[in-house]
Amino acid sequence: MAKNNLTRRQLLKTTAAAGVAGTLFGPWKHNRVYAAGTDKPIKIGITSDASGQYANSGASDRRGMQMAIAEFNAKGGVLGRKIESTHIDTETTPATGSRVAERMINREEAGFLIGAVSSGVANAISQVAQKNGVIYFNTNSSSPTESGKNCHRVKFVWDGNGANFAKAAVKNSIDKYGDKWTLLTNDYVWGHNTAAATKTLLEQYGGTVEEEILVPQGTRDFSSALLKIQQGNPNVVAAAIGGDDQKALRQQVAQLGMGSSPAWINNQQDWPDVYGLPLDNLFGVFGTTWYYKLDLPGVDDFVARYQAMYPDTRMRVPGNVFYNGYMAMKNMLEAIERAGTTNNIAVIKELEGHKMSAEDRMQHHDAWIDPDTHQVQQSIYLATAKSETDDKDDMFEILNNVSPDDVRDTGAAAACQLESYDDTPTFDA
């Protein structure tokens, strides 16, 4: 296939010849005009949920991105150009995600896309992004398929995925609690793929799945599922339940006094899903990528900057979703700076294999972007509720940290087939 490589100069010459400002004629796949100089801002489309199951996480995701943008603009922008962003609600719905991505690219002229919590939405956005060659950062969705069979050359995945969290938790939980497990699974792509990763590890380490209970998105009454769990009497319940569904689940488990028996493993715990809940709702062991009380360089300053920028936000401290949104945006803008251009292929090459120090990431281990899957390989933390605390915001007790080498998702690497550079449309944003 011929390489679709239109430079800004070629685009502008073609436009001038046509005599119509802002319109291109001819056999080109993408009719967009890009900046000829530094007076035009770099436009970024934020594709996060403002309604639906992940509305709270979507808001936290956006705040992280916006803080990174504000810090770069305060230093003069990127390559002398101001950073501008626009946001459209993706509604936790894949079809809406596709429409939002199309509008961002073709009407808003966004040169980059960023944001997601739902893996189904992220996959839909990434298909549109790849078709147009627009770099897309999936900030907070964690189905293994996002960096596996649904990977794309333009997509980069910033959260840990279900397989990473399962690897951190499953063997230790079998050894500590027992080998009879029940899976409680949100009935959509993230839940199914996270449960599949858990099943694979249970088989590897000698555990058994006694039952899997599928829970539709939007469930608020878990009584029938909890009755099945009581009747089955497993050693461990592995829950892949997210967003507002998880809040309802936690409240009902606590009300029934089921938080300590059986043992509960929640694959991943997003901070917006539990912030403000009573500590007896925060039962079990769960995974995260970051916590605001990590005793590491830069963490206190990061929290202070958050509080200065968002003094009226109900969530008084940042969590993992905010952290992922901030780190993704920061690294997107730094990659443009390193490339010295907004050309999408040049920026992609800057990102592939990029190494990030533990200090820069405010984590315990160095991180890197896997060049074969485009997933960030990073520290994974296991945590539980803090038993005693005088600070209502300090809810987590970090139990341990696991290096990215120990939780790497080899299944994603085997399933991912990135498009070639030549088959990815290229342009300067």
Image (spheres, helix red, strand yellow):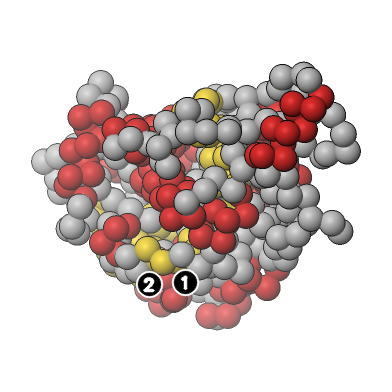
Image vertical order of residue 333 relative to residue 67, above or below? below
Q: Position of residue 7 (x, y in %)?
A: 68, 44
Pointer 1: residues within 10 angstroms few (<14), some, or many (20+)? many
Image vertical order of residue 314 relative to residue 362, above or below? above
Identity of the amino acid at label 2?
Answer: Ser
Give the side of residue 178 with respect to residue 231, left or right.
left
Give the side of residue 226 with respect to residue 397, left or right.
right
Viewport quadrant of the N terminus:
bottom right
Q: Secondary structure at mark 2?
A: loop
Return the residue at label 1: 407
The residue at 27%/42% (across/down) is 279
**Residue 403: assigned label:** 2
Viewport quadrant of the C terminus:
top right
Image vertical order of residue 362 relative to residue 227, above or below? below
| Cα–Cα gap, marks 1 and 2 | 7 Å
The residue at 74%/26% (across/down) is 16
Q: Is residue 258 at all visible to an observer of this figure?
A: no
Image vertical order of residue 171 relative to residue 232, above or below? below
Q: Position of residue 129 (x, y in %)?
A: 68, 43
Q: Secondary structure at mark 1?
A: helix
Identity of the amino acid at label 1?
Answer: Val
The residue at 82%/39% (across/down) is 29
The answer to whether the residue labelled 1 contacts the one labelled 2, judged by CB atoms less than 8 Å apart, is yes
Q: Is residue 205 at all visible to an observer of this figure?
A: yes
